[in-house]
Amino acid sequence: MPRCKRYAAAVHPKLRDVAEHAGVSVRTVSNVVNGFRYVAPATRERVQASIDALGYRPNLAARTLRQGRTGLVALVVPEIDSPYFAELAARTVRIAGARGLTVLIDQTDGDAEREKELLHGRRGQLVDGVLFSPWAVAPAELAARTDPVPLVLLGEHDGTAGVDHVAIDNVAAAREATAHLLGSGRRRVAALGIQPRSLNATARQRLAGYRQALAEAGLPAEPELAVPVRRLHRADGHQAMLRLLDLAQPPDAVFCFTDELALGALRAAADRRVPVPEALAVVGFDDIEDGRYSVPALTTVSPDKDRIAELALDRLTAAPGPPRSIVAPHHLEVRETS
Amino acid sequence: MPRCKRYAAAVHPKLRDVAEHAGVSVRTVSNVVNGFRYVAPATRERVQASIDALGYRPNLAARTLRQGRTGLVALVVPEIDSPYFAELAARTVRIAGARGLTVLIDQTDGDAEREKELLHGRRGQLVDGVLFSPWAVAPAELAARTDPVPLVLLGEHDGTAGVDHVAIDNVAAAREATAHLLGSGRRRVAALGIQPRSLNATARQRLAGYRQALAEAGLPAEPELAVPVRRLHRADGHQAMLRLLDLAQPPDAVFCFTDELALGALRAAADRRVPVPEALAVVGFDDIEDGRYSVPALTTVSPDKDRIAELALDRLTAAPGPPRSIVAPHHLEVRETS
């Protein structure tokens, strides 16, 4: 068995050593290592035997990152219990796994100090790259970053920071969502999710799209229909919707800046016995699993989360170059609330 | 300023150095470092000034783990996009943060091979401890573990593995949930969530509790009312509930082994225009945020997730000793579906 002997001597066997030993592709080894189910049992067994024979350690697998050392990528999100981020994280882990990369998830609670720490290398000693979904950190902080570990921002920001980022076109998506409501004859469309003092661009961009759609329909942007919230959770949507329903002239539709807000708004409509969509149409944003099973099922802007993860990982492993803004696809998923 | 001078000389300032420098408790420093909001602005500012003055680096903070080196703890869960695990993870990150520990979240997709890798030290070089929520791995694998990194299992298992674990009393919780349905006069109570060939003890224990409650009420366990599912998600609950509603004698209540299953079951009831709770009472398990805002709001077994995280972290940082099974509290949260 000269083959086995040769490989047994290697101190740090690589993915391709295992592939050659087992007589399969690197991708197949990666699939086995990462536990994907679509590998035939016999192949899996052969690959596992080679892994054992060579003493291969999977978390040293990835050599493809710009400065690849550990095969680890950090995914930094504000709140892992926010379903949008949980779904994005789950998909990122799976897609990275198929590329031989391991993703470790970090939660910042949207706190500027924690975000700053992570931006400026708190994980530098551990990871080969950082996927970062900023919440509270100022654009100037991003621009001031000197950490050499590659960074890709996920989600919208103001584009001034000079770093790579991947996001859907939030302004266009918000305009489509609002136009959809106006197109079905609604005339008092509220916008729920404004965050007046936030550094985060999300709410600003979604508000801009909402206003564009109103302007295109020749309708004024009525201040009382643009509702600020503290955070973007169900409880905030619930409270804000109750206030909207208490107006002398309540809205006949609401565009919510997240599905969580929209689910809170649906609950408020149920509390007040306002039928949805007859008396109140509701559109959310994020296409979380939750809204597919709600009663009624939620119409929502659906960002292509798989594509966001793929594009971000592509960018993280690409050759260094000038910062790019990459736009991921989205579509409006019309269900029962509109 | 002799104080500042003394501390500025320290190479690796600790949490308590910052605390002494700022004239506050270690806990307050930890709260600031981890971005908790309940620190007064003036205090936060003073602590931040001390952190800057001493050049303190937060991720080297924790020295309390049995073999503490990195201050990092891995939390391994099957699916981070499953709300129960997302909520447990978010709380674990926050609670660990207040103790000066950083939690990195790993997702296994419930795959036995990935779980095995993580059990046997795939993260060993990185972390001081592992909180592990196993799904597919066999008890024998747990018993065979030789990795010296401390491990605490989260969630039920069969208790044969000789490792520390923290879980609620699943049998008692399932019995209470079923007894609650029987106590309101229901007589055909279905159990939704059986996983016949799973190595995971969750479904087995919840089924046992369901059967105990039936037996205590003098009712037979009817096989057609105990419904198997492939996974524990909304889609599985939706399909299984549709089948139950198609029975010649459909159930008048259903105990679902997860809230996700229950939310799918609620959607199925809405599809068939079966009024909840009038014609069908529904109880879930997990108390995810989702069920608090569903229409109608979901009655559920509420595990104390904060306490689970606290107890698991306590155990991880305790002195070595014989394996312990620690029971976390739970209660039945009665809402609108029962």
Image (cartoon, coloured by chain):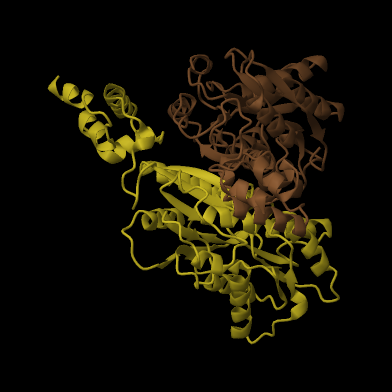
Chain colours: A brown, B yellow
Comparing A164 with B81, the one in front is A164
In the rendered image, residue A64, in percent from the top left (x then y), is placed at 64, 31
Quarter of the view holding residue A16: top right
Quarter of the view holding residue B284: bottom right
Comparing A261 with B310, the one in front is B310
In the rendered image, residue A85, in percent from the top left (x then y), is placed at 62, 38
Comparing B303 with A123, the one in front is A123
Does any portion of residue A186 appear in the rendered image? no
From the image, which quarter does the N terminus of chain B lie in?
A: top left
* As drawn, B262 above or below A318: below
In the rendered image, residue B82, in percent from the top left (x then y), is placed at 63, 51
Q: Is B314 left or right of B22, judged from the image as shown? A: right
In the rendered image, residue B279, in percent from the top left (x then y), is placed at 75, 67
* As drawn, A95 above or below B329: above
From the image, which quarter does the C terminus of chain B lie in?
A: bottom right
Q: Is A170 left or right of A147, judged from the image as shown? A: right
Measuring 58% from the left and 72% from the top, which residue is drawn there? B205
* As drawn, A25 above or below A307: below
Q: Is B95 left or right of A183, judged from the image as shown? A: left
Measuring 43% from the left and 51% from the top, which residue is drawn there? B129
Comparing B312 with A234, the one in front is B312
Q: Going by the picture, which residue comes out furthest to the front?
A: A2
Does any portion of residue B69 appear in the rendered image? yes
